[in-house]
Amino acid sequence: MSEKKMSVLEHIAELRKRLIIVVVFFFVAMITGLFIAKPIIVFLQQTDEAKQFALNAFRPADPLIVYMQFTFIIALILTFPVLLYQLWAFISPGLYEKERRVTLSYIPLSVALFLLGISFSYFILFPFVIDFMGRLSNDLNIQQMIGINEYFRFLLQLTLPFGLLFQLPVVIMFLTRLRIINPAFLVKVRKYAYFVLLVIAAIITPPEIVSHLMVTIPLFILYEISIIVSRFAYKKAQSSQIKESDQK
């Protein structure tokens, strides 16, 4: 661990500096998003899922709302690695040297899992849900008139949560390294965790059993992977602590 001890005011000043860096980068990313949003929106409208509907603007402001939504989301995604690094930089003085190096490597892993979660939802779950909605409309003899704002809002609400949910193994690994949780605790609360994941799956999927299982089963698998990861991280953390203590 770092031998320098900071006062409460120094910690607050350090946190303030880290937050300012994140906020400034976010606004720069917003400017970048203004240029990237248009081609992404146009591309998404050419997909097979979007072509099933005649996307309409029911209000004059709908195109602007969609444009700004994507600009904001792009800025968040671009800022995400910076936020993780600043978080790491804030807590790293309280970690052992080896823990600093290991936890720093979590950042690219976290970004990769975020993109993997979005990809899983967009390429696997979203087409299935859209197909289900289309078949249901046909069965009920309903002609769908979809607003472009509603379509993209539904798309984002279904895909973005998976980017966050796929962070579970990294979060568990990180908390285990910080000795906040341990594998025994995760095993002990497994049934409660399953219930929470079951509720989350029910919230973000339509009321249809197949799509619900398509979400629930990967979440359960992620939790089991998190337990395995926690066991590995726990052993590493204990080993690092013993080595650091022997060197003193």
Image (spheres, rainbow, N blue to C red):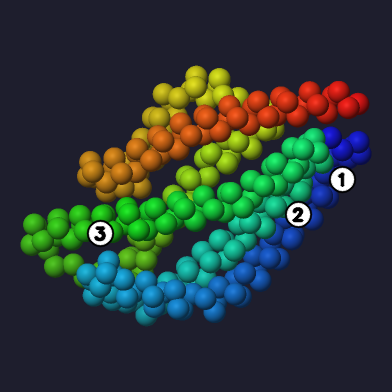
- Residue 41, given in percent of the width and then of the height, sits at 41, 74
Residue drawn at the location 46% of the way across and 78% of the way down: 38
- Name the residue type under label 2: Arg
Q: Earlier in the sequence, mark 1 or mark 2?
A: 1
- Residue 191, given in percent of the width and then of the height, sits at 41, 24
- Residue 226, given in percent of the width and then of the height, sits at 51, 34
Q: Quadrant of the N terminus?
A: top right
Element at badge 2?
helix
- Name the residue type under label 3: Ile
Check the image and report above or below for 2 versus 118: above
- Name the residue type under label 1: Glu
Q: Are marks 1 and 3 in contact (CB under 8 Å)?
A: no
Q: Is residue 177 left or right of residue 63?
A: right
Q: Distance between the Cα atoms at labels 1 and 2?
A: 12 Å
User: Marks 2 and 3: which is nearer the front?
Assistant: 3
Task: Answer whether residue 189 is visible to the viewer in this image.
Answer: yes
Tell me the quarter of the picture where residue 66 sits.
bottom left
Residue under pointer 3: 130
Q: Distance between the Cα atoms at labels 2 and 3?
A: 41 Å
Task: Answer whether residue 181 is visible to the viewer in this image.
Answer: no
Residue drawn at the location 41% of the way across and 39% of the way down: 219
Q: Distance between the Cα atoms at labels 1 and 3?
A: 52 Å
Check the image and report above or below for 18 versus 31: above
Residue drawn at the location 69% of the way across and 42% of the way down: 103
User: Marks 1 and 3: which is nearer the front?
Assistant: 3
- The local crowd at label 1, few if under 14, some if 14 to 19, many if 20 or more residues have their Cα within 10 Å, is few
Q: Earlier in the sequence, mark 2 or mark 3?
A: 2
Element at badge 1?
helix
Q: Nearer the viewer, residue 82 or 154?
A: 82
- Residue 26, given in percent of the width and then of the height, sits at 64, 65
Residue under pointer 2: 18
